[in-house]
Image (spheres, rainbow, N blue to C red):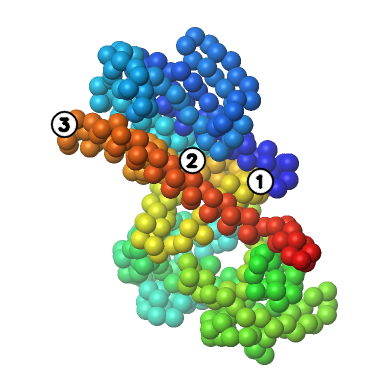
Amino acid sequence: MTIITFLYFLVGLGLLIFIHELGHFLVAKWAGIRVEQFSLGFGPKLFGFKRGETEYKISILPLGGYVKMSGEEPEEEKIKPLDDPRSFAAQPLWKRVLVVLAGPTMNLFLALLLMPLVFMVGHQEPSYLHQESVLIGVKKDSPADKIGMMKGDKIIEIEGKPIQHWLEVMKTVKKNPNGSLELKVLRGSEIKSFQVKLDADKDNLVGIFGIEPPLFIVFPPIIAEVAPNSPALRAGLEANDRILSVNGTPINSWDEMSDLLTASQGKNTQLEVLRNAEKKNLAIAPTYDSDNKKWILGVVKKIPEGSYIQVKYSFAEALENGIEEYNGLLGLTFKVLKKLFSFKLSYRALGGPVQIAQATAQAAKSGFGDFLYFISYLSIQLGVMNLLPIPVLDGGHLFFMLFEVARGKALSIKTRMIAMQVGMALLFSLMILVTINDLSNLQVVHKLINFVVGKF
């Protein structure tokens, strides 16, 4: 991790933690609760100051923060009188609920505030979205194929609304899973009208037409990056290699390669690659990615220049696009959590601090808009994750409060302390696992391991 990567990580994560804890702090102050400490980070204090009754500080471990309120921890009830009118425990239930909800709510609100700004300052978008809506292909047996649409048709109107480019088409189709649309297309000099019944994706969330450009845009199989500890690395593949054939079958796209790898079912596969104008033959055994349910080599595809462009929007357009994108990312976050808790997705798919730091730096490198986009998405995830009913998280505190309402009295101090310890152990274990997973994907770590192993 470079210094600049670490700095971007600190700025991004620091903003999210500050906003989260500021929510707890402001509502606690409004409720008249005594706030003893406001800390960014955990562990020993680096520096800070005290103003009034509150100590403000920055601590050495940047992966979190906290607002310490009087009477907040269960063990304090043993040593502090419950009739202290300014303690957290002495507040009516509705005030305590508001204080706990304030942190995640601030994160969700921050994302909602930043996302329209992303579209105003501009961010990277696929260039085809801003090109004329001329069909470059029609998927067989798709809704478009069934009504007779053809390659070269230009969509000029949907539901009576004039269409200029693919962005308008994609947005309309996306919003209508299993819906019906009336459209007009220009075929040569003739205008044709169609009524199409769209399909939907497997989650019934997004409409599918069968003429979407990503289905037909072909990226040549050129490698941008080789993943550590992957079949590609072991086989000797390198960045900028172009894969020419798989088991003797010539290929021109990543999709063609993926189909042939699937057919190999993990058996030893022969690749012909072009490297610096020289052809090389490499043997490789693909590995199965259970999360995505496909055979992979462990490479990142190279995106040709010009595939993405920087786009800015007017205030009204940015507001509309920002809210739409916010809702989409919120839904995606819940979908990922559902897969995690139903064991359809491995914890290995989660990014730990190292991956987050790298992604933050990469987003910042792409431009301020992309940096804001990534921070917004992280803020959504932080807000939602903190609402999970896990002790030590805000959702865990809310769960205790709901239990208090249902039972008529709070759980015992001993029970709450045990639950908090279990929750802390679970979160700490998960953090260790995702961090180890992060490190296992770093090339420098593998080089270090190989160096150490080589000494014995």
Q: Nearer the viewer, residue 84 or 171?
A: 84
Image quadrant where one finds the C terminus: bottom right
Q: Which mark is residue 50?
A: none
Question: How many residues crowd mark 1 within 10 Å: few (<14), some (14–19), many (20+)?
Answer: many
Q: Residue at x 59, y 35 (%)?
A: 61
Q: Which of the two marks, 1 or 3, is nearer to us in this view?
A: 3
Q: Earlier in the sequence, mark 1 or mark 2?
A: 1
Q: Residue at x 62, y 46 (%)?
A: 357
The residue to which callout 2 is attached is 379
The alpha-carbon separation of the residues under discs 1 and 3 comes to 49 Å
The residue to which callout 1 is attached is 361
Q: Which of the two marks, 3 or 2, is nearer to us in this view?
A: 3
Helix, strand or loop under label 2: helix
Q: Nearer the viewer, residue 430 or 277?
A: 430
User: In this picture, is 306 found above or below 119?
Assistant: below
Q: Residue at x 58, y 61 (%)?
A: 128
| Furthest-right residue in this view | 277
Helix, strand or loop under label 1: helix
Q: Earlier in the sequence, mark 1 or mark 3?
A: 1
The residue to which callout 3 is attached is 408
Q: Quick check: can you spot residue 116?
A: no
Amino acid under disc 2: Ser
Amino acid under disc 3: Gly
Question: How many residues crowd mark 3 within 10 Å: few (<14), some (14–19), many (20+)?
Answer: few
| Furthest-bottom residue in this view | 248
| Furthest-top residue in this view | 52
Q: Quick check: can you spot residue 13?
A: yes
Q: Earlier in the sequence, mark 3 or mark 2?
A: 2
Left or right of residue 30, residue 220 in this image: right
Residue 333 on image: x %, y %: 42, 51
